[in-house]
Amino acid sequence: MQQPKWNDYKVSFQKIIQNNPYTKLRKTVSWLAWSCDGQKLATCGYEKAVRLWTPERSTELRSTASLSGGHTEHIDQVAWSPVHKDLLCSSSSEDKRVCFWDARQSKVVQSIRMEGSPWQIGFAPDGKTLLIVGNDSRAIFLLEHGKREEDAKETWNRIDTPKHSIEQGNASIMDFCWLNSGTAIAAGCTDGSLKILEYPSLQLLHSNLSHFGQCNSLGQHPRGNYIATGGNDAILGIWDMQEWMCVRTCSPYDETVNWLRFSYDGEWIAGVWARQKEITLINFEMGEVGHRIKTSGEVNGLAWHPSKLLLASCGDDEDKTTVGWVSFFTPPS
């Protein structure tokens, strides 16, 4: 494999300033996600709104659009439908709402108040189911897309969540991803385990100890044959899904692995280690560090473009609770 000339790639930062600071520490920019066609990037955080970027046209803050009116508190995460380029949703564990948006409109399409505190959200590969992990009890909730019988209007409805093995033990979910097939969910848990849950029953199919301490982040390789995990033991591990063996590891820092994400082609993993003001790009085949991207503070979220080597990230400036940033690591023009 021919390694890109990473030093020729450019990094651009956009600052987002919070005008009315909260009395308690909250992440200024907490999460980000690309639309399925890669034309738009959505970010969220303190603004109580979802901000839409069009990086190919401009990365200036003044060129963004804001989707507001659905949340009354800090937004934790945002996710795009994998099959609809304009449909996205957002979650807030504080106002306990999941909101659905159409990027072509400025108002919320549907707002659902949850019984728990929704935190992490993720669409199934077919876009018909939304899985939600709660912030307090780490409970799992499911929303299903359908049509109302009375008027045939499209809507999202809460469906009964079956009991699953995680509820019966001491483990709770730290991160999850749908497997490419859509028939199972991978979950990284507080007991250091990597669990595979069958969908829709959520019955436990497989579990193995992947880390000492918490398993904080995970992701499936685009080809579907490997899963990468990162944990409190500072190790990023690659697991063969056929043999369930760790085939290689990478640990460039003696710190907790907070986040990891695969590039669209599966050749690179972007990783974030705690207290490091940088993003580390790791070669998947070799398990070696290929490049380090400097940031202006700790990273809260990562998102690779769905069809090119373009990495977006977000975070907060060091020692400043009122200034956040969004960064684009792009090839030279």
Image: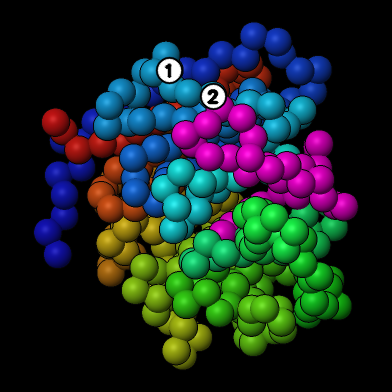
Q: Which mark is residue 61?
A: 1
Q: Position of residue 2 (x, y in %)?
A: 12, 59
- Disc 2 marks which amino acid? Ser
Q: Measuring 14% from the left and 31% from the top, which residue is drawn there?
A: 333
Q: Which mark is residue 18?
A: none
Q: Which residue is mark 2?
A: 66
Q: Measuring 34% from the left and 49% from the top, which residue is drawn there?
A: 37
Please report the bounds of the magenta region as a residue range.
94-123
| Nearer-N-terminus badge (1/2) | 1
Specify whether residue 98 is painted magenta. Answer: yes
Q: CA distance from mark 1 to mark 2?
A: 11 Å
Please indicate whether residue 93 sits to the left or right of residue 247 in the image: right
Secondary structure of residue under mark 2 = strand
Instruction: Give the farthest residue toward the top.
Output: 19
Instruction: Give the farthest residue toward the front.
Output: 151
Q: Measuring 28% from the left and 62% from the top, which residue is drawn there?
A: 265
- Disc 1 marks which amino acid? Leu
- Tell me which corner region of the image, top left, top right, bottom left or bottom right, holds residue 88: top right
Looking at the rendered image, the disc whose residue lies closer to the viewer, 1 or 2, is 2
User: How many numbered discs sit on the rendered protein?
Assistant: 2
